[in-house]
Amino acid sequence: MTVENSDNVPLAIALVLGAGASTGLGAAVVFFPSLVMIASRKVLGGSLGFSAGVMIYVSFVEIMGKSVIAFKDGGYDANKAQMFAAGGFFGGVIIMMILNKIVSSLLGDVNTRGQPGPVSPTPVAKTMRESDSKDDDDEEQPAVEKVEIDGVEIEVDDDFEDNLPLPNQGNNDDDDADSKGEGEMDEDERKKLVAMGMNTALAIGLHNFPEGLATFVAAVNDPAIGLVLAVAIAIHNIPEGLCVALPIYYATGSRLKAFLWALSSGASEVVAALLGWAVLASAVDDVTYGILFAVVAGMMVIISVRELLPTAHHYDPEDRVVSHAFILGMMLIAISLVLFLV
């Protein structure tokens, strides 16, 4: 695939930038006190269930379909295209399981799947009601443990189980160290949520990379098709941003860290566009696209099955909202694909 019309390059990059930045729309929920105050076990469980529905549906219906088509365009018949796509899918599952082991070892002896042992969410609403009455100037700053994943550090307060930093209301402290209340999370629970958010950000980032490249190439060759694809990607990036931000916010209490981690998962689309402009647009063939799409589909599904859904059910053990939110996520992304993908 060759970039023939250089006049469309700025528009193509702008479309990719908009689609990638849409993860920030979902992540922005952590900046609004009114939304955080209503956060509860059901809200977090429903949010994770909704995101799992989006990710699983997109993986099986859209991304795997793209993989099969790419293999066919690469010269393979229907049977081989299906076989190679399936192989890539399960390859992605294996890769994500290996990455999960690596993250687990980096974070210590904490199972990041979210299954063993209940995870008790911090009572955010209670914390926000009580925090305004506290005199924070007399409080000693908590010790901070730095968890580093792939060169990026997340700070975790040692006494976070007693003090959840809250969204700013009238100050500019990005780490929210001055607004604290009571909480219940222990260190293992924090690490589980941080690891889940990071794993999800990684999987979504890898998933967004080929989508960013595909959007760029489509927009350069036909801006109308590129626009439709960018809008469809932006729609399903919004709940993905929420999916990344909420666990990290609950674990660290930092709105900024949660937002930036979610935003970084969409930044890979911009990186893909720039690489496509420089090199990949003329070097990547259809078979490579087929492999990429199949692998990231497998990664998205295993993240949903091993992390998002189990954690969602821990927060909603009676399944009052998770299953409904899961179906709703699939329904909304299905509608978006019908409306915007042509």
Image: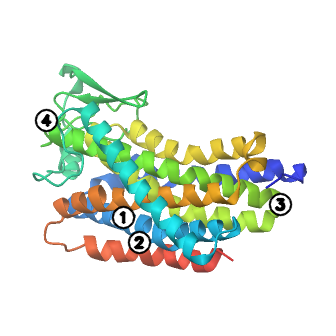
Name the mark on residue 221.
Answer: 3
Q: Secondary structure at mark 4?
A: loop
Q: Residue at x 27, y 63 (%)?
A: 309
Going by the image, does 285 lie left or right of 68? right
Residues under labels 4 and 2: Cα distance? 34 Å
Left or right, residue 238 beside residue 45:
right
Q: Which residue is mark 1?
A: 52
Q: State which mark lies toward you, 2 or 1.
A: 1
Residue type at mark 4 is Asp
Label 2 sits on residue: 329
Q: Which is more foreground, mark 4 or mark 1? A: 1
Q: Which mark is residue 162?
A: 4
Residue beneath the point at 67% across and 52% down: 213
Of the two numbered discs 1 and 3 in the rendering, the one whose residue sits closer to the viewer: 3
Alpha carbon of mark 2 to alpha carbon of mark 1: how far? 7 Å
Q: Which mark is residue 111?
A: none
Categorize mark 1 by other alpha carbons within 10 Å: few (<14), some (14-19), many (20+): many
Q: Amino acid at mark 2?
A: Gly
SS assignment at label 1: helix
Residue 41 percent coordinates (x, y): 20, 59
Dot 2, crowdedness within 10 Å: few (<14), some or many (≥20)?
many
Looking at the rendered structure, the secondary structure element under dot 2 is: helix
Tell me which numbered mark, 1 or 3, is placed earlier along the sequence: 1
| Three-letter code for the amino acid on which mark 3 is drawn | Asn
